[in-house]
Amino acid sequence: MISGDQTPNVFRLDGAQTTMVFTWTDGMPALLSHGPRLSAETDLLALAAALERPLPKGTLDVSEPVSLHPEAGRGFMGHPALIGRRPGDERSWAGRFTGTTIVEQPDGILFKLVDESRGLGLELDCRINPESDVATLKTRLSNQSDAPVIVDWLSPPVIAPDRRYGEFLSFHGRWSAEFAVERLPIPVGTTLRENRRGRTSHDAFPGIILLTSETGEEQGACLGCHLGWSGNHRLMLERLPDGDRQLQIGALLIGDEGTIQQGETIETPPLYVARSEDGLNALSQKFHAHVRTCLLAFPDPKMPRPVTVNTWEAIYFDHRHERLTALADAAASVGAERFVLDDGWFRGRRDDTSSLGDWYPDEETYPEGLGPIADYVHDKGMQFGLWVEPEMVSPNSDLYLNHPDWALSVDPYPMIIGRNQLVLDIARAEVSDFLYERLAELIGDHGVDYLKWDMNRDLTLPGGEGGAVAASRQVHALYALIDRLLSAFPSLEIESCASGGARVDYGILERTHRFWVSDSNDAVERLRIQRGFSHFFPPEIMGAHVGPTWSHTSGRGLSIGFRALAAMPGHFGIEADLTKMSDDDIEVLTEAIERHKADRDIWHQGRYSRLQTVDPGLTGVMAISSDQRHARLVMAQSDRPEASLPPRLRLPGLINDRPYRITLQYASENLDRANRHFDGALWTGGLTLSGEMLAAVGLCLPIFYAQTALAIAIDAAEA
Ligand code: DGJ
């Protein structure tokens, strides 16, 4: 709801728990206050008067705040929101926009500005979702003159975080170690992180959370921002000498890819912003709600997330029919509901040195095409999924032989190979048409229910036709190709994978349904990766697989029970050779799948939170159903406990005066041996506690060995 009755210059936007107050002073809007929801009677004029700034000594005669679009032409001394120029016009680097119109729009407000002397129009588009409480901000710049403009940087509407946020969470990582979280103080000056990899990247997630020194999972203020974009980006947090802070996160433009001709407009990707006064879990729950209600589009929203068997770590490139059918038999018998044929099924693909682009079933391993295996899987009652990596071409492929010019390159520089592959210029119509036709035929002919869409290399020198830079175009072309496929096959689901989690963001999520979060199936590492991921993404889109006993990325060996519990909250899957598992492991796994199926509505629709104990090696996650009658939690001990006795576990979020029955669902192997003696009620049959006692007092857990875990069920006890 936008309203601003008391004055034409102060406006408010209200989410469920947030009010954003904008001023429109001297023609430039600013976000004056971004905090808890204010009452409808709030006097906005008085609010603006209360926040009027004094003028410090030794400065310009204006004290320019961090506006929605800070610019040097108004005396702003920090990094500007727009950097651009018009070739041949010597004055075009400078400028100053002035507001013309304010437009009310659904759940939002649109500020329109112009700079007549530069011939530029600017739109600052700010919305807040009334239910999720997440704001979506975008900037559009249009060229209204007859000469081109080169934009080097354009920020979405700029965030001016409150000064109480003295720290931030940085999200970084590397291959098979995504979503590492580091808590750092906000230093004076600029904290800059750039991603030039052409995909979202493992190492620079386009998101940040600002917080106070008191903020934890369950308490304190925090502000989270995430750019919905799957390409290059820049994240800039600036602490200015006057104490103000500004946060700009936008698409990083290289070469002249920000050029706009007469009449053209450039739009930033959406910046998603949420805040909480009640800790990091409450912030995550807002992002989860936004993903669930505004971004995710499951073809069948009522269908539970199917338990998935993926062939990769089971068979790699060994696609003999009898191996696959044996794996499909084993998959069906443990309760899998989807079977995904990973890399290795297409013409000539025996290892990762060849064949990307030749999207035809391999004639040797699949003499009758994919029909027999697709039918076999369907006949077992499972969905059939197929791995593809459409944006890529192997130099050793028929496609490259026939169309060497389709690969991105800049003549005369040598093309750098990554995993033996090059990148196709998918913004070219003939290339995207080719890919569309190949994929559409495969999906149509074999009733493919699901694609695992992989992308296994960074872009270097992404030159399109004539060498023109094509990095951003590539992302838009990817979105267009997926959109085209989804409109032709509306029941298709797609998993976004890029060497694990290098393409995890809200931009790709608007057209996909699951993330392959990491190539690490090591459950100890997974617990940490999944924890980082959960700050912005809910568990139902978190591909979480039970891998082999010995992880091929870390060399660590873990029990089946621990591996299964680490995967329990996510979109559960198995990526190990089921045909070689021991009977004991199959039994534990089958039970875990049954338990997951029984509980997945709670995990996937409930309020999900991270539990933290005083022992850094002991972490947990919990989901509470929307009616607060049921909760499920998994506690896992990654490292050896710090102390000989475990800490108490407090569980907030249930109804205070309701009794709940608490039962141990499952304890992983060896856990009982870690305790000389434990006959606590949790261990011996369960206990009944009120929601208040669970939150305020908590309960004592058994002693954990390193790499053991347990699952607990909490269900409303009938009065
Ligand atoms: C990288 C992915 O992340 C893996 O899960 C697997 O699909 C391989 N590619 C296949 O080449």
Image: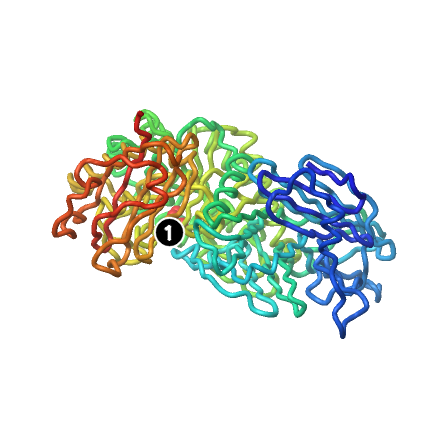
Residue 315 visible? no
598 relative position to 112: left or right: left
Badge 1 marks a residue whose secondary structure is loop
Q: Where residue 487 sits: x, y (%)?
A: 56, 31
Q: How is the image coloured?
A: rainbow
Q: Where residue 110 sits: x, y (%)?
A: 74, 43
Label 1 C-beta lies within 8 Å of the nearest ligand 1 atom: yes
Q: Residue furthest right?
A: 117
Tell me the residue that label 1 is attached to: 519
Answer above or below: position of 350 versus 71.
above
Q: Classify residue 41 by image quadrant.
A: top right
Q: Where residue 154 sits: x, y (%)?
A: 69, 56
Answer above or below: position of 68 versus 633.
below
Is 489 in front, or is 250?
250
> The N terminus appears in which quarter of the rendering?
top right
Q: In the image, what residue type sits under mark 1?
A: Asp
Residue 582 visible? yes
Is 624 in front, or is 661?
661
> The C terminus appears in which quarter of the rendering?
top left
